[in-house]
Image (spheres, helix red, strand yellow):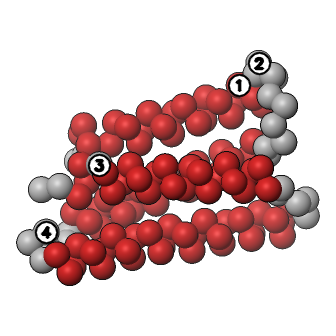
């Protein structure tokens, strides 16, 4: 369906997961105070949201610029709402503070996925 259009997103997903699993197993000496489980959940959620937005964008009339702008804004807002919801559910379920470094890393991932989505081939004809 998407073939070569999502290679960079898949590469980012695999790289973050590889980093997370290596950090969990102790192969990486990380002095960062990042909760790896939270980061892996956010990574999976962002990947899912990327594909949901890609499917939704495929159905938009690309000749209408207003529809395209609305669709991009809706995808960004939807991703942000899901991101905040997952963070809130995680913090209430685990009862452990997530921490600023973990949230900033997750927000960086969010911005990078959004940049790849907007820059990527999904929005081109």
Q: Which residue is mark 1?
A: 22
Mark in the foreground, 3 or 2: 3
- Residue 99's x, y, as percent? 83, 56
Q: Which residue is mark 4?
A: 62
CA gap between label 2 and label 4 equals 46 Å
Where is 37 relative to 17, above or below?
A: below
Mark in the foreground, 1 or 4: 4
Q: Say which label, 1 or 3, has the lower sequence index.
A: 1
Res. 2 in view:
yes
Are circles 2 and 1 on residues that touch, CB within 8 Å? yes
- Residue 98's x, y, as percent? 82, 57
Label 3: how many Cα within 10 Å (few below 14, some 14–19, many 20+)? some
Q: Say which label, 3 or 4, has the lower sequence index.
A: 4
Which residue is painted at 24% across and 49% down in the image?
121
CA gap between label 2 and label 1 equals 5 Å
Q: Which residue is mark 2?
A: 27
CA gap between label 3 and label 4 equals 15 Å
Which residue is painted at 27% across and 75% down in the image?
69
Q: Which secondary structure lies at badge 1? A: helix
Q: Which residue is mark 3?
A: 120
Q: Which secondary structure lies at badge 3? A: loop
Left or right of 37 on screen, residue 61 = left
CA gap between label 3 and label 2 equals 33 Å
Label 4: how many Cα within 10 Å (few below 14, some 14–19, many 20+)? some
Which residue is painted at 51% across and 55% down in the image?
111
CA gap between label 1 and label 3 equals 28 Å
Number of numbered discs on residues? 4
């Amino acid at each position: 369906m998407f073939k070569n259009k999502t290679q960079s997103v898949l590469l980012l997903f695999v790289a973050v997961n590889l980093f997370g699993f290596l950090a969990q197993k102790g192969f990486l000496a990380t002095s960062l105070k990042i909760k790896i489980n939270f980061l892996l959940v956010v990574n999976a959620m962002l990947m899912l949201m990327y594909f949901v937005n890609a499917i939704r964008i495929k159905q938009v009339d690309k000749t209408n610029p207003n529809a395209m702008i609305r669709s991009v804004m809706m995808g960004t807002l939807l991703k942000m709402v899901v991101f905040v919801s997952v963070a809130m559910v995680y913090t209430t379920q685990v009862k452990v503070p997530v921490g600023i470094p973990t949230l900033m890393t997750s927000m960086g991932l969010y911005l990078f996925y959004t940049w790849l989505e907007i820059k990527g081939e999904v929005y081109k004809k």
